[in-house]
């Protein structure tokens, strides 16, 4: 809150307090100019006291002191401020009476008991003011914390999307471009087809990764383009068995999820297996669940996730994206048997 707005709000609060007090006083006895002056002076002193307490709370970070420290400060400091307010007001009244500037009706209550009552009243007003201020500040902190939380999540999501955009293996691009260069002279028509497939793959990576989920049909299209480009590099060493249930029409999934599974199968299975092998891609629907299974020849060694060529980071990325956009029942399992690695993913369709 700006200084001007805070001053205006303080003026409304304590000005209202003065007007209400004068109105209540007028219902019992006539209100003289001296009473008006004293009440205005009290309102001004309360303004100064509340601003002083607020400045002290900000400077000493009361809200960071914990519940016990905050309650201790709230219990002790407002009464001290109230004593200072009433002592100052008593001095102003005494000076005004001595100079003949103020006059009050004879028999008006005074003494230590009256002063104590005024001090208690002032303490209560300062407690109420601080309670409201602390409540507003706590609410603002919670709101800012929520905003910071969402901003952090948005930044994490943006970072994830940047990783997704850069996820296409640079070696895949280099291999694809080199193979295209060789293919241009040998088979220009096929070279043009492969350029289109490479363009589709890159466009999907840049555009669709900005979405939480994409249609399965779009993902299948880009993965088929990706596989065709990899087959250009691996030739007969890479064979793919597609098993896509027609019931999966209309399903969706996080972008590049299927591409990641197939990329890992080729990179960590086909590329490492002498003579290559078969990559099986099985996509089926089970009620509201989409099941994707990709298997490939090779071995999986979960005990070596730190290796540069390990699938550990890719699987961590996969699980993170499933957790974000795969639904409550999203899951990823790995099964190794008979020299083949099978990665099964379940997520909401």
Image (cartoon, rainbow, N blue to C red):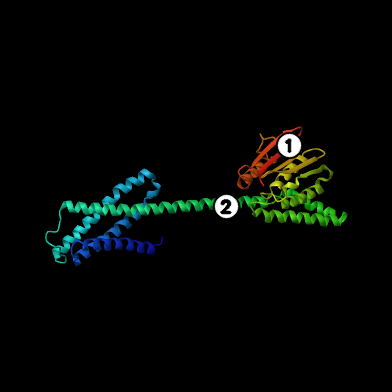
Relative horizontal placement of residue 37, taking residue 223 as reference (left or right): left
Q: Position of residue 100 (x, y in %)?
A: 14, 66
Report the front residue among 218 and 171: 218
Residue placed furthest toward the top: 338
Work out whether 127 lies above or below 333: below
Q: Secondary structure at mark 2?
A: helix
Residue placed furthest toward the front: 287
Q: Quadrant of the N terminus?
A: bottom left
The answer to which image quadrant residue 239 occupies is top right
Q: Which mark is residue 341?
A: 1
Residue contact between numbered discs 1 and 2, judged by CB atoms under 8 Å? no
Relative horizontal placement of residue 215, taking residue 146 as reference (left or right): right
Residue at image location 18% in from the left, 61% down from the top: 93
Work out whether 93 lies above or below 216: below
**Which is nearer the N-term, disc 1 or disc 2?**
2
Q: Position of residue 290 (x, y in %)?
A: 69, 44
- Residue at which label 2 appears: 155
Q: Position of residue 146 (x, y in %)?
A: 49, 51
Counting other residues with Cα less than 10 Å from the Cα at mark 2, is it few (<14), some (14-19), or many (20 or more)?
A: few
């Amino acid at each position: 809150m700006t200084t001007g707005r805070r001053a205006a709000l303080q003026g409304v609060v304590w000005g209202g307090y003065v007007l209400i007090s004068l109105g209540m006083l007028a219902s019992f006895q006539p209100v003289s100019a001296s009473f008006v002056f004293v009440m205005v002076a009290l309102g001004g002193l309360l303004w100064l006291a509340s601003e002083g307490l607020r400045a002290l709370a900000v400077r000493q970070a009361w809200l960071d002191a914990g519940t016990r420290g905050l309650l201790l400060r709230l219990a002790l400091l407002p009464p001290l401020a109230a004593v200072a307010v009433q002592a100052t007001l008593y001095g102003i009244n005494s000076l005004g009476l001595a100079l003949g500037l103020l006059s009050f009706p004879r028999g008006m209550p005074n003494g230590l008991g009256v002063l104590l009552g005024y001090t208690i009243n002032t303490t209560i007003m300062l407690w109420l003011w601080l309670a409201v201020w602390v409540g507003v500040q706590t609410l603002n902190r919670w709101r800012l914390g929520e905003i910071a939380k969402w901003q952090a999540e948005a930044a994490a999501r943006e970072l994830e999307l940047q990783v997704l955009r850069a996820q296409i293996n640079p070696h895949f691009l280099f291999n694809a471009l080199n193979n295209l260069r060789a293919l241009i002279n040998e088979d220009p028509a096929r070279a043009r087809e492969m350029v289109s497939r490479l363009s589709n793959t890159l466009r999907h990576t840049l555009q669709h990764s900005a979405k939480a989920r994409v249609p399965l049909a779009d993902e299948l299209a880009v993965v088929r383009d990706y596989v065709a480009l990899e087959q250009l590099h691996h030739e007969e060493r890479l064979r793919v068995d597609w098993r896509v249930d027609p019931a999966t029409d209309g399903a969706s999934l996080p972008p590049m999820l299927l591409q990641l599974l197939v990329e890992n199968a080729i990179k960590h299975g086909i590329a490492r297996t002498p003579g290559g092998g078969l990559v099986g891609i099985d996509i089926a629907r089970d009620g509201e669940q989409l099941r994707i299974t990709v298997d490939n020849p090779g071995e999986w060694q979960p005990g070596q996730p730190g290796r540069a060529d390990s699938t550990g980071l890719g699987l961590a990325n996969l699980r993170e994206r499933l957790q974000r956009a795969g639904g409550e029942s999203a899951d990823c399992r790995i099964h190794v048997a008979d020299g083949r690695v099978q990665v099964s993913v379940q997520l909401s369709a």
